[in-house]
Amino acid sequence: MTGRELDEEIRSELSALSGQMSAAVARHLVMAQRLLEDDPEQAYEHAMAARRKAGRIGVVREAAGVAAYLAGKYADALAELRAARRMTGSAEYLPMMADAERGLGRPQRALDLAHDPAVTGLNTAGRVEMLIVAAGARRDLGDHEAAAVSLQVPELRSNARAEWVARLRYAYADALLAAGRDKEARRWFVRAAEADVDEETDAAERAADLGED
């Protein structure tokens, strides 16, 4: 592991550092990437080590923010992702920031972020993710019907072969169930399962638990 495993764009950003420092930061970022899924705590430690060495580089702050979020360190995640946004101008992580606000027990702040004008500039996956987070914030506030209504968007019926389709349908089904609309919820869990080709969710099991129509 040398650090050259990173994408060329990231290595280019690190080129502002001295050769030795750039290599050290790159190695920490590679380890953070590798550990994110299986050991988020260790990924966080590597990302923060990179941040201590290169805190003025946007991609490093992004990595620290993502690792903190996945490790459940929501206050750190917000601090790092806010800094990254100031440095890079990118709104890519707004949904993650909003979900971190939920994790800190601040659903109204999550909804405020969902109304940030920059959300409209996100790609489809990003906009859908923000819809899901905002619906979750409404459920945190006890407004289950409003959560379901907020997810009634044209993308629910998309034929795109993309992960966000299953995630959106699943979130809608879950919101319907919380609102007491069990039959509709079952239908949408079935539709979520149909879109979930990689079986990333338990939509099929949720549908089965609700019985037949």
Image (spheres, rainbow, N blue to C red):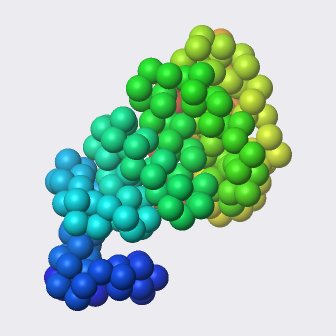
| Residue 89 vertical placement versus 127 (above, below) | below
| Residue 169 vertical placement versus 80 (above, below) | above
- Looking at the image, which residue is at 41% across and 85% down? 12
Quarter holding the C terminus? top right
Q: Position of residue 125 (x, y in %)?
A: 64, 56
Between 41 and 83, the residue placed more toward the observer is 83
Is 206 left or right of 177, judged from the image as shown?
left
Q: Position of residue 120 (x, y in %)?
A: 76, 51
Rendered image quadrant of residue 91: bottom right
Viewer can see residue 34? no
Is 5 left or right of 131, judged from the image as shown?
left
Quarter holding the N terminus? bottom left
Q: Position of residue 25 (x, y in %)?
A: 23, 73
| Residue 200 vertical placement versus 55 (above, below) | above
Between 75 and 173, the residue placed more toward the observer is 75
Is 203 left or right of 126, judged from the image as shown?
left
Q: Position of residue 45 (x, y in %)?
A: 18, 54
Which residue ends up furthest to the right in the rendered image?
154
Between 169 and 97, the residue placed more toward the observer is 97
Between 4 and 88, the residue placed more toward the observer is 88
- Looking at the image, which residue is at 28% across and 43% down? 71
Rendered image quadrant of residue 37: bottom left
- Looking at the image, which residue is at 32% across and 46% down? 68
Viewer can see residue 97? yes
Numbered disc total: 0
